[in-house]
Image (spheres, rainbow, N blue to C red):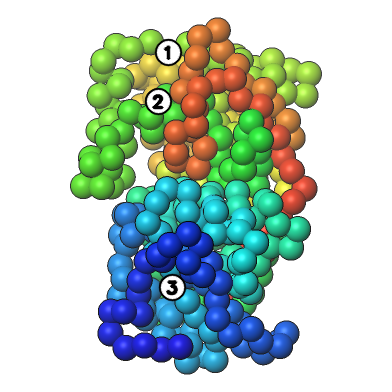
């Protein structure tokens, strides 16, 4: 169970490779089987952090296995796989990796508990839930096993945990070069947004049809939580551990309007800005006369139209003590 040296942290090999199982089946209420799935390409990835967390969990009497992903989609396939035998799945990665896990869990009637090691560029979910970043505190949180229901929505049938949007923010997500993102982190988004803003490119108007109302805007964000782009509050009424989605729509996206929106977001007051429309929504259709870039949870998601809806399903997520 506890081989020495670097061999303890390894990538799975072969189809299935048993890496989506955690050895040591136990009686309920005793030691838990904990699978840590890590994306080694995520920003801030640190193998030593994973080993420290795993060691503390093993010391707490639990069976721990670490799986490093080797291909896109592996997290989702592992979480959906019929051979998954874990009481807790710990995702060490960014918001996109968490999205993959939720997508995989959607195929399961009784998903295991989810925990998060915050890697990634922004990791908005970590900010939303006020998750710890230090290995010792992450391990303590998992050992304490305090759970809340993690709600999510669907965009064209695909789960999202944080948000689905169409407009300039999705345009930035589509346009950002991967090497720039890896080198500069959050700053890469700012640089790409500035490049788009000063390129003179004109996007299409967007219509959001929701609950008998048609809202015309330039940027439509349907959020499941209060945070956006990190710790910035986009919708104080929203929470990922409570049911319900919220629309935040920007009427204009010219340079001046975008600048004021950025300042309002930084101050936590974007929901009160004159250029912004907010609504609670349970179902919405986002459409445009010409295709507009879309994104979910910080990853590209094709183009409009989008059909976005709230769902009743939840996944248990381990959160810090208050």
Q: Are marks 2 and 3 in contact (CB under 8 Å)?
A: no
Q: Position of residue 70 (x, y in %)?
A: 37, 56
Give left or right: position of 220 versus 191: right
- Please count the marks in the image: 3
Q: Can residue 10 be seen here?
A: yes
Q: Secondary structure at mark 2?
A: helix
Q: Are marks 2 and 1 in contact (CB under 8 Å)?
A: yes
- Sequence order check: which comes first, mark 2 or mark 3? 3
- The alpha-carbon separation of the residues under discs 2 and 3 comes to 35 Å
**Residue 187 in view of the camera:** no
**Left or right, residue 179 beside residue 110:** left
**Quarter of the image where one finds residue 112:** bottom right
Question: Looking at the image, do the residues carrying marks 1 and 3 touch, with CB atoms under 8 Å apart?
Answer: no
How packed is label 2: few (under 14 Cα within 10 Å), some, or many (20 or more)? many
Residue at the spot 55% in from the left edge and 20% down from the top edge: 304
Q: Residue at x 46, y 23 (%)?
A: 293
Q: Residue at x 35, y 50 (%)?
A: 121
Q: Earlier in the sequence, mark 1 or mark 3?
A: 3
In this view of the protein, which residue sits in the foreground, 74 or 111? 74
Q: Which residue is mark 3?
A: 66
Q: Residue at x 66, y 35 (%)?
A: 157
Secondary structure at numbered mark 3: strand
Residue 146 appears left or right of 20: right
Instruction: Read off the residue under disc 2.
Output: 171
Q: Please identify the quadrant where the C terminus is shown.
A: bottom right
Query: What residue is pinned by disc 1?
Result: 203
């Amino acid at each position: 169970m506890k081989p020495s040296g670097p061999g303890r942290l390894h990538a799975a090999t072969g189809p299935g490779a048993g890496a989506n199982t955690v050895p040591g089946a136990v009686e309920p209420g005793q030691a838990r089987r904990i699978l840590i799935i890590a994306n080694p390409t995520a920003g801030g990835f640190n193998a030593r952090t994973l080993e420290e967390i795993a060691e503390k969990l093993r010391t707490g009497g639990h069976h721990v296995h670490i799986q490093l992903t080797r291909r896109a989609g592996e997290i989702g396939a592992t979480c959906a796989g019929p051979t998954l035998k874990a009481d807790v799945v710990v995702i060490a990665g960014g918001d996109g990796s968490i999205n993959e896990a939720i997508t995989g869990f959607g195929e399961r009637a009784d998903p295991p508990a989810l925990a998060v090691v915050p890697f990634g560029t922004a990791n908005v979910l970590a900010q939303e839930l006020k998750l710890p970043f230090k290995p010792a505190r992450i391990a303590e949180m998992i050992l304490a096993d305090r759970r809340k229901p993690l709600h999510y929505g669907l965009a064209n049938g695909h789960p999202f945990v944080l948000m689905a949007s169409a407009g300039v923010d999705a345009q930035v997500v589509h346009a950002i070069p991967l090497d720039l993102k890896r080198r500069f982190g959050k700053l890469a988004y700012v640089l790409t947004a500035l490049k788009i803003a000063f390129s003179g490119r004109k996007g299409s108007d967007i219509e959001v049809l929701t609950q008998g109302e048609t809202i015309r805007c330039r940027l439509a964000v349907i959020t499941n939580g209060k945070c956006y782009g990190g710790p910035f509050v986009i919708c104080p009424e929203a929470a990922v551990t409570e049911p319900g989605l919220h629309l935040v729509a920007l009427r204009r996206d010219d340079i001046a309007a975008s600048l004021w929106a950025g300042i309002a977001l930084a101050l936590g007051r974007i929901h009160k800005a004159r250029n912004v429309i907010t609504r609670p929504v349970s179902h919405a259709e986002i459409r445009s006369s010409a295709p507009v870039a879309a994104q979910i949870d910080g990853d590209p998601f094709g183009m409009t139209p989008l059909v976005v809806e709230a769902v009743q399903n939840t996944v248990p997520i381990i959160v810090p003590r208050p």
